[in-house]
Image: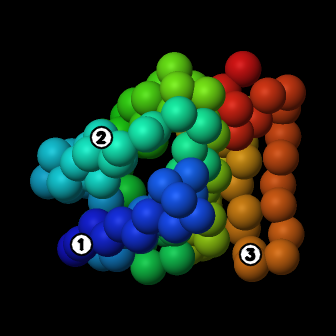
Amino acid sequence: MSVRREVLEDGKKVQINISGRFDYKLSQEFRDTYRHIPGQEGVAYYVDLSDTDYMDSSALGMLLLLREHAKCRGGTVFIERPSEQVGSILKVANFEQLFTINYTDNTSVNSGSGAGAGA
């Protein structure tokens, strides 16, 4: 399991990749990927879950904390390419109402008003 971060576009785009298990053991490492970025106003966070094979309720909570962090700073959160299993968990948890979830490279599912921005 690992968390990788890449900051792009003058710090206004942050790509977070999670591989393996996304669970409580990654909580501090995940928080560190978005808390230690200078100039955090208006940042778009892209969480790539294409290599994530397991997600538990603490991972859902971590995504909600990232959403709140971004929202307080005028940013947005996008969930990118979840695996089939992880995508099912996100759907059951109604995360499509809270996030913009891109299930493939070209298709965006945007259900509910204010998705992504956390209205």
Q: Position of residue 5 (x, y in %)?
A: 36, 66
Of the numbered discs 1 and 3, the one sitting upstream in the chain is 1
In the rendered structure, which amino acid carries the disc numbered 1? Ser
Please state which of residues 73 and 112 is positioned toward the viewer in this rendering: 73
- What residue is drawn where x is 51% and y is 20%? 72
Q: Quadrant of the C terminus?
A: top right
Residue 74 versus residue 19 in the image, above or below: above
Mark 2 or mark 1: which is in front?
Answer: 2
Residue 1 spot, x, y in % from top left: 22, 74
Q: Which residue is mark 2?
A: 35
Taking 24 as reference, is 76 left or right? right
Report how far apart the C-alphas of labels 2 and 3 lie in the structure.
27 Å
Label 3: how many Cα within 10 Å (few below 14, some 14–19, many 20+): few
Mark 2 / mark 1, whichever is N-terminal: 1
- Residue 114 placed where, x, y %? 79, 28
- Whether the residues at callouts 2 and 3 have beta carbons within 8 Å, the answer is no
Which residue is identified by label 1?
2
Mark 2, secondary structure of its residue: helix
Q: Circle 3 is placed at which residue position?
A: 104
Q: Is disc 3 placed on a helix, strand or loop? A: loop
Question: How far apart are the alpha carbons under marks 2 and 1?
Answer: 17 Å
Quadrant position of residue 109: bottom right
Determine which quarter of the picture holds residue 43. top right
* Residue 92 in the figure: left or right of residue 3: right
- Circle 2: residue type: Arg
Give the residue displayed 24% in from the left and 72% down from the top. Answer: 2
Residue 29 screen position, x and y as percent = 19, 54
